[in-house]
Image: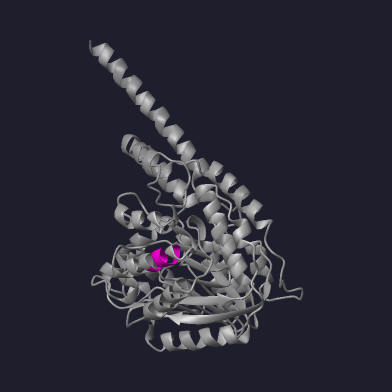
């Protein structure tokens, strides 16, 4: 009997060892970063049963198949991009256009929308004036008075005969109530949720989330930026308090590119082709050159990281970036540091308060890396600052959803509009100058901080690959 038990235990141990090795090999093949692969492999080998189960539930997914199929879907859609109003002269946006796989367009106009009230007033006003089509996409929509205002405006337009498509990324059981969605569907509004890689958890997708925020009205007017749809974004969440954010409205040919990005997301989510509806290119409407860049984790060039690297390389005099999170990929951090060493005025504006404590403390572990090269980090004091804005010299500005962190660079679907022109840069300059006027420069090194803060920052940085 003892020999039987010994043999049985040995067989079980051997089976677990084989399973752990297979899981480790799969983690090596499918992880997006070397750090992520190392973390999974160590967990699996040190705790074979627990680590393997965690990997099967949270880590394992058919990423390669997803990336290949989504990339093919996007390429088919992008082949139909309109060439109308495309600039034929060299542009400072050419590098960004190559990253975006779309041309730089001429004849665009932009208006800044600072904070929630201005944003919701403009977006809801435009929705209520829609005559033909509405593309609406948000990462978060809550069933509160802000979310219900959006719902009611969409229902009103649907009853007036406007065709409406709504994309909303949510986790099952944590998203909108069924009654909220039913009211939209009853009037003919099409609803869909973005799809991620196939995995054991199915729709419980924590990576490869669609973080884009976009509204396109009649293919003539578009909005994008940092805000989602809830009372948090007007500063009425008591756990966070006051909120600082930025959206922008756009007219001109770049609206067609934004409609194209929505169509690409919708095609992947539902297999419904909206390319004919999205194909109409608006007439020129202003002095700006612009391109809509939409990084995707399905791409093989890490476009989100290349976006920040391209900003750093384009800067001659200054590079100002406002982001709620500062957990940069190593290559991005190197580009920022090199820009500072070249004499560029590199300033990063981050929150002085936390909404997610791990990312808040992890950011502190990166401050010294930038500061040692001559860059500056500033913390915004009056509110939690959530805007994703960049300013290069006096002629390039960017407004969108891309955070300065590894998750945005590698794991999320994001969106930003880059503009070349004095009017856009001047407006963003004025806005960021005001923001920096309410901020405090970081002048303390991490070793000189409180012992607990320093420890938390160093521990949090270990989680950087998944933040």
Q: Along the horizontal axis of the image, is 41 left or right of 277? A: left
Q: Can you say whether 177 is above or below 384 in the image?
A: above
Q: Could you tell me what secondary structure mostly forms the magenta stretch?
A: helix
Q: Can you say whether 232 is above or below 180 in the image?
A: below
Q: Residue furthest front?
A: 160
In this picture, which residue range is highlighted in magenta? 153-158
The residue under the point 30% across, 50% down is: 173
State which quarter of the image contains the N terminus: top left
| Residue 154 seen in this snapshot | yes
The residue under the point 59% across, 80% down is: 109
Coordinates of residue 403 in the picture (x, y in percent):
46, 67
| Residue 444 seen in this snapshot | no
State which quarter of the image contains the C terminus: bottom left
Q: Residue furthest right?
A: 88
Q: Along the horizontal axis of the image, is 223 left or right of 419? A: left
Query: Is residue 155 shown in magenta?
Result: yes
The residue under the point 42% across, 28% down is: 18
Coordinates of residue 320 in the picture (x, y in percent):
51, 80
């Amino acid at each position: 009997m003892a020999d039987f038990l010994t043999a049985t235990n040995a067989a079980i141990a051997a089976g677990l060892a084989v399973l752990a090795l297979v899981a480790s090999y799969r983690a090596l093949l499918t992880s997006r970063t070397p750090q992520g692969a190392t973390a999974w492999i160590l967990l699996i080998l040190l705790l074979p049963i627990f680590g393997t189960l965690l990997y099967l539930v949270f880590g394992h997914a058919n990423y390669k198949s997803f990336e290949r199929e989504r990339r093919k879907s996007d390429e088919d859609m992008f082949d139909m991009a309109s060439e109308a109003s495309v600039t034929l002269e060299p542009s400072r946006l050419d590098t960004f256009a190559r990253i975006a796989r779309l041309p730089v367009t001429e004849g665009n106009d932009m208006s800044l929308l600072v904070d929630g009230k201005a944003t919701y007033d403009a977006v809801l006003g435009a929705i209520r004036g829609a005559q033909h089509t509405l593309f609406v996409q948000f990462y978060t929509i809550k069933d509160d008075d802000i979310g219900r205002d959006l719902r009611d405006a969409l229902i009103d337009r649907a009853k007036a005969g406007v065709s409406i498509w709504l994309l909303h990324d949510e986790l099952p059981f944590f998203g909108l109530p069924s009654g909220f969605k039913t009211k939209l569907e009853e009037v003919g509004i099409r609803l869909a949720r973005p799809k991620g890689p196939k995995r054991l958890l199915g729709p419980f997708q924590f990576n490869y989330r669609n973080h884009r925020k976009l509204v396109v009205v009649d293919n003539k007017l578009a909005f994008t930026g940092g805000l989602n749809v809830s009372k948090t974004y007007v500063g009425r969440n008591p756990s966070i308090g006051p909120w600082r954010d930025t959206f922008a409205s756009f007219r001109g040919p770049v609206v067609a590119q934004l409609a194209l990005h929505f169509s690409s997301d919708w095609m992947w989510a539902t297999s419904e082709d909206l390319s004919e509806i999205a194909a109409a290119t608006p007439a020129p409407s202003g002095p700006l050159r612009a391109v809509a860049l939409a990084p995707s984790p399905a791409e093989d060039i890490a476009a989100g990281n290349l976006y920040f690297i391209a900003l750093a390389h384009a800067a001659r005099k200054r590079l100002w970036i406002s982001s709620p999170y500062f957990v940069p990929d190593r290559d991005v951090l190197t580009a920022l540091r090199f820009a500072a060493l070249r004499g560029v005025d590199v300033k990063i504006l981050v929150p002085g308060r936390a909404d997610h404590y791990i990312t808040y403390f992890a950011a502190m572990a990166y401050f010294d890396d930038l500061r040692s090269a001559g860059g500056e980090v500033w913390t915004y004091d009056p509110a939690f600052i959530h805007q994703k804005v960049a300013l290069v010299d006096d002629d390039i500005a960017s407004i969108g959803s891309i955070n300065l962190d590894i998750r945005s660079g590698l794991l999320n679907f994001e969106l930003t509009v880059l503009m070349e022109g004095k009017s856009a840069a001047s407006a963003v300059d004025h806005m960021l100058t005001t923001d920096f006027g309410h901020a405090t420069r970081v002048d303390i090194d991490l070793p000189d901080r409180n012992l607990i803060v320093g420890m938390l920052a160093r521990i949090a940085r270990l989680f950087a690959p998944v933040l």
